Amino acid sequence: MTGISADQAAQLKIVEQRLLWLSHWMIHNANHIRPKVDGIKIGGHQASSASMVSILTALYFSALRPEDRVAVKPHASPVFHAMHYLYGNVSREKMQNFRGYGGVQSYPSRTKDGDDVDFSTGSVGLGVAVTAFASLIQDYVRAKDWGRDAPQGRMIALMGDAELDEGNIHECLQEGWKHDLRNCWWVVDYNRQSLDGVVHEGLWSRIEGLFTAFGWDVVRLKHGVLQRSAFAEPGGENLRDWIDRCPNELYSALTFQGGAVWRARLTEDLGDQGDVSALIDRRNDDELAALMENLGGNCVETLADAFAAVDHDRPTCFLAYTVKGWGTPIAGHKDNHGGLMTKAQMADWQTRMGVAAGEEWEPFAAVQDAKALQSFLRQVPFFAAGPRRLHDAALPVPAIAISSEREISTQMAFGKILDDLARGDSSLAQRIVTTSPDVTGTTGLGPWVNRRGLFARAARSDTFRERKIASTAKWDAAPSGQHIELGIAEMNLFLLLGAAGLSHSLFGKRLIPVGTVYDPFVCRGLDALNYACYQDARFLIAGTPSGVTLAPEGGAHQSISTPLIGMAQDGLAAFEPGFVDELAVIMEWAFDYLQRDGEGDPDERTWLRDETGGSVYLRLSTNPLEQPGRRHDDAFRRGAVDGAYWLRPPGPNCDVVIAYQGVVAPEAIAAAGAIAEARRDVGVLAVTSADRLHAGWNAAQRARARGNMSALSQVERLLQPLPRDCHLVTVIDGHPATLSWLGGVAGHRTLPLGVEHFGQTGTIGDLYRHFGIDRRAIAERALALTAGRPIATVWA
């Protein structure tokens, strides 16, 4: 094993103790010193930070290079912030306001923290799996002619052992095996304690078996330098055998109780055995406690040596045995996950740590040779490069158009638009990377893949094509391919999109990630979707097919809540176009929107923060609709992007407006025609994005509250001409709440129609009638609403 020098080991130990103190003092300050406002515990996970402090020290101050990227265990956030505070990258004010407004975040955040966070963490397990997909994206980028100069580093996850309970990690391991994962390290903080208890005995063997089965190297770090030295003494093998057989709960309890109890238990179990008794007696109680707590994951020298010894690119799992709460008065206690040191415990510990009163926030307090430490810090490779956020120029977006001369579905048009891009050689097309969880051919991506191919690090031919067996799929795999094939795991889909959507920042090469998924199964990957958006990753996701319009498939495949998810998800602009010319306009806008990274005031035309950009969600359908003909005017194009436009403008005496979103367009249009003679000046409002309409309305209201009384949103401009007693009927193949809020814009009485319950099999007509979103039902409800009669009399 390649060893670090004695001087390096000494400096790492000093850094470790500094991080241990600063992280714990930050938490203590937030909970016991800073004035409280809400009367609740602020928390901060002192014990979980302590068990990780040696790992972060050895990794960041010895093993890492600037091109490496790390997802830090959420509960080790205080150590991460302390590390950057030590370097002067975070102000004392932010540290003092930990978990407070404007302070460093509870969990590392790319978007909320000022220090150099590579991957946001917080939703347990997601920060782990994204590193594997980031490694895959790194290989993808470097395989391309335009990406060969991209940096190549290790993608590293620091995780707690309890995070292995998360199913997405297991799904990720299988996907990594399929794609020949490399340059990926996962370091498991094996402290054997979680929030509710102690892990089952022998979990380590299951962990090793799991990783080995998927082709990972496993490095078990159980014993630190002190323990290995003791094992070499006479009687040491007996001690080693006792440690290896000791149950997790007992080891934790003895750790909490300290050296005298350790001595009594070891003497009782091992008896008077001469050599082993002498080994124990040579150490006082403090020394014995330090020996027994010197597990591999709490020993910076052991960790640094292990990291330095890896000289290959195979995925590697380091199983680092640690003590939860290591080095503190609460070490080993079963309740320490959310526990805090008391004021008395902290005062005693401060004395033991050698930190003088008044110097608690001093970065180099208790350091005997501060100059030597500062010299060491200046030479640490990882920090030498400074901030590591990279950038790439925005790609020009070619004009996108599609023929709307025939019946066509939005899903088919989506595939046709991508196929048209695939035929060309624009810089945008070169950077598009597509992916789908085993539904590539059924969600419209097939033509794109036929032209652009599957991605693989090593070329792989299509056997069916070689044997001249007819197939619509011609999917050869090669490094030049632009589609990443995934298995049926929607969490993996959104984690991959999240990693690809950060490529410009991680690797300095912009990608345009496009994913597809069956719309109801957006919900399967919702946690990862939210996580990707929280990272500010940029991607386009098409949920298709959607709604009860997917009639024969039944309720298990029919989405209801996804329009509301699109509205509620921050960082995601959601659209549901009904016609393909709308889709073309939206996609051209979206490819530019994904690349925006500006700041500034809201656009006074929409009151949306479009300068900042974000990701885009398209809710599409397989139902081919008759198209409305050629439309190219600016009002239409702007309306499609801003969220709505008048398909049939209302007259001055309008009695009723039918507002629809998505595939129900023909039903709404036909219903408006059916009541045109009975009701005056009927209008039809085509809503392409309830999300953007609603967001713009809220933003304009906030602007008016701040004194800008001229602020007017898109939806307010559209509804402003309507008479006060006009009625709105809204309809969507989805939850009716998606559009029901329209009545609140100007106070119009509104009847929302949609789908609230699980569907069933049948024809589209059957299900539309069943849920009351067919043209006849829409017309009858509109007539009843405007007549003031009970709806039941019309249905009768």
Image (cartoon, helix red, strand yellow):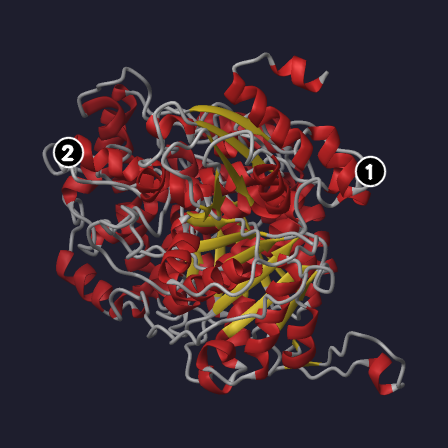
Residue at the spot 49% in from the left edge and 55% down from the top edge: 157
Percent x, y for residue 266?
A: 57, 31
Percent x, y for residue 708?
A: 14, 38
Count neighbours of disc 2 (C-alpha within 10 A) and say few if under 14, some if 14 to 19, many if 20 or more: few
Count neighbours of disc 1 (C-alpha within 10 A) and say few if under 14, some if 14 to 19, many if 20 or more: some
Residue at the spot 36% in from the left edge and 36% down from the top edge: 652
Depth check: 247 or 335 in front?
335
Instruction: Provide the residue designation for mark 1.
Output: 761
Percent x, y for residue 596?
A: 33, 62
Secondary element type, mark 1: loop
Instruction: Provide the residue designation for mark 2.
Output: 706
Secondary element type, mark 2: loop
Q: Quadrant of residue 732?
A: top right
Depth check: 395 or 623 in front?
623
Depth check: 559 or 517 in front?
559
* Above or below 753: residue 598: below
N-terminal-most mark, 1 or 2: 2
Give, as a three-letter code, the residue at label 2. Arg
